[in-house]
Image (cartoon, helix red, strand yellow):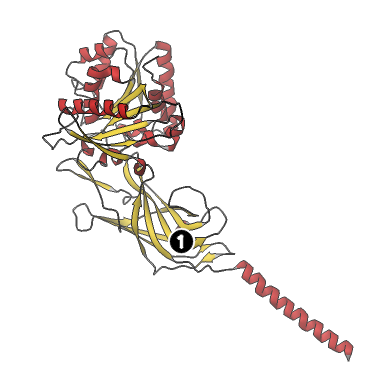
Amino acid sequence: MTRLWTKAASASAAALAVSAFAVTSASAQEHEIDATAIDATLITEVAPEGFKVAAVAIEYDRALRFGGTGLDPAAFDVDVSLGEGMLSALVGERTVTAAYTSATPEITGQQREGRYVILELDLADPAATGSYTDWSTSLTHYYDLEGTYSVAQVADIGTPRASVAAQPANVVENSDVVNPIIDQYASGTLATAAGPELEYRYYTPEKAPGKKRPLVVSLHGFGESGTNNFSQLAGNQISVAFASDAVQQSDPAYILSPQADPFDADKGAWWAPQMQDAVIELVETFIAEHPDVDTSRVYLTGLSMGSYGSWALLQEHSDLFAGAVVVCGGGVADEAAAAAELADFPIWAVHSEDDWVVAYDAPGSDYRVFQALEDAGTPVVWTEWSGLLPDDEQERLAKTALKDAAVTGSQHIFTTIEAGTTPVFNHLSWIPTYSNEVILDWLFAQDADR
């Protein structure tokens, strides 16, 4: 009897153990996290082609910890409705290219424990833009992006060990918008003796005791004109390229970006003499207020309308600057005089061969000035490539130009973007310019004291 009882008890105990193991194993393999999406934040970016929404950060009501390298991008739906009721209204869907958890609403590319799920978005989506052009004025305007993105988690996310169940009916709208670079710029206004009250934005680099920092002054194009003190940063990369983490790590620099307003009679475009005087006053005031600016490394860059102002400033105030990058430039009244004045001044110019806004070989264009430089016996390095080549290939060609400049002793490099190869359309030669780290590095290498 005892033996029979023992066998029965043993069998029963074994069954209970198997059952308990199964429950424990199932529990270990599958644990549902009770987390709910409660908000969303848009992360914008000034891409080479303009202002874009690069990611959405979904906030959950508790931290998520999954391990692994990321989540399934197909588990999320992202819908866009911009400018409702406007002629420029834009409705569409966004393509999620990567998804991962994070402790902060920022693009890191790495999964970390946190309350946020970062959804990286395809910048080529038709609905990726955050701006539009008013063709009656040619000015770029920006959508009010708050509440324009709707996001839903439509499938389970996580791992076999821990997951958050799908919640397709829980659609959250973004309540905030951030821009990791633009948000680091401060704002200012200067009432100049020249007349115009000049609004500007400026970026402050990381300080280091005893270290001087260069200053980059950027003059925007016509489309970025206005009074919002924002477009000159968001319209294209003329300013923010210098504020990128990569550039600031290698060349920490101040960046000073004023805004012009051609529609204001008290201000004007960059080709207006009072605006040129105002820019010089702003630069000199900024240097006086920031004694750690390296006055031997003050640089000027301008595109389109800003290149008109740049050429004028360089002819009158080349002693203030150490080098310049001018893009799709024009407006020079006397090419020979400009060539004589700037024979020893370092300039890298870029212009699309088929530019129909600022014609490549029109009187007063940067191309004509460089021809005048060469005619006067000043060595010029002429380069030409497709603006559609991969960035690394364009940078390789730019390095070749630098080698040629070193051999010839040239301070002047002219890059032609081949006809039919400018991204978006043929005036936008600034896209391949400010994406080219070799050109930016060349500018930082210029030193007026050398």
- Callout 1: helix, strand or loop? helix
At x 19%, y 25%, the residue is 277
Percent across and percent down for residue 179 are 36, 46
390 sits left or right of 318 in the view: right
Q: For residue 443, which quarter of the picture?
A: top left
Q: Is residue 163 above or below residue 135?
A: below
Q: Residue furthest bottom?
A: 1
Residue at the image point whose x is 42% and y is 58% from the top: 58
Q: Position of residue 334 (x, y in %)?
A: 18, 15
Q: Amino acid at mark 1?
A: Ala
Looking at the image, can residue 85 be seen? yes
Q: Nearer the viewer, residue 236 or 391?
A: 236
CA neighbours of label 1 inside 10 A, class few (<14), some (14 to 19), many (20+)? some
Given the current orientation, which residue lies at the most extreme top position? Answer: 377
Question: Is residue 414 in view?
Answer: no
State the residue position of label 1. Answer: 75
Judge by depth and name the residue closer to the eye, 168 or 251: 251
Q: Residue at x 57, y 68 (%)?
A: 31
Identify which residue, 206 or 394, lies in the foreground.
206
Q: Quadrant of residue 198?
A: top left
Looking at the figure, which quarter contains the C terminus? top left
Image quadrant for the N terminus?
Answer: bottom right
State the image coordinates of residue 407 (x, y, percent, origin top left).
43, 12
Q: Give the side of residue 209 with respect to residue 381, left or right.
A: right
Which quadrant would residue 398 be assigned to in this image?
top left
